[in-house]
Image (cartoon, grey):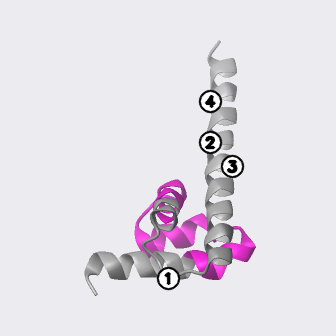
Amino acid sequence: MTNSDNTTQLMLDFACSWRRFGGGPDEDIMVRFGLSAPEFFRRVERIVQSGQHRLDAETADELLKVCRRRLWTDRSQHSAARARSLRHSA
């Protein structure tokens, strides 16, 4: 197993263990993987979509839903923060 394969498996293991709890804390993701939560979920989404895993279809579907929810939430929070910033600077 290569380092890349090992990292991929560690990311999938983490995501699977937290999938029923929204994907895991941003801080834990940063400490374990050195990635922001959005980057982590983009990578997990790509891994699952590519089929480079040994997940059953139900688990893969659950992970995709968690990834998409977290990415949507992150974009929504950034959009809201940007809108507040623009209102305050106007």
Residue occupying image coordinates x 51% and y 77%: 12
Counting residues from the N terminus, which is met first, the one under dot 1 or under dot 2?
1
Residue stretch rendered in magenta on the structure: 15-44
Give the CA separation, mark 3 to mark 4. Answer: 14 Å
Nearer to us in this view, 30 or 15: 15
Find out whether residue 4 is within the magenta segment: no
Three-letter code for the amino acid on which mark 4 is drawn: Arg
Magenta stretch: dominant secondary structure: helix
What residue sits right under mark 3 in the picture? 73
Q: Quadrant of residue 27?
A: bottom right
Mark 1 lies on a secondary structure that is loop
Q: Position of residue 36 (x, y in %)?
A: 48, 58
Find out whether residue 31 is within the magenta segment: yes
What residue sits right under mark 1 in the picture? 54
Label of residue 82 in the image: 4
What residue sits right under mark 2 in the picture? 75
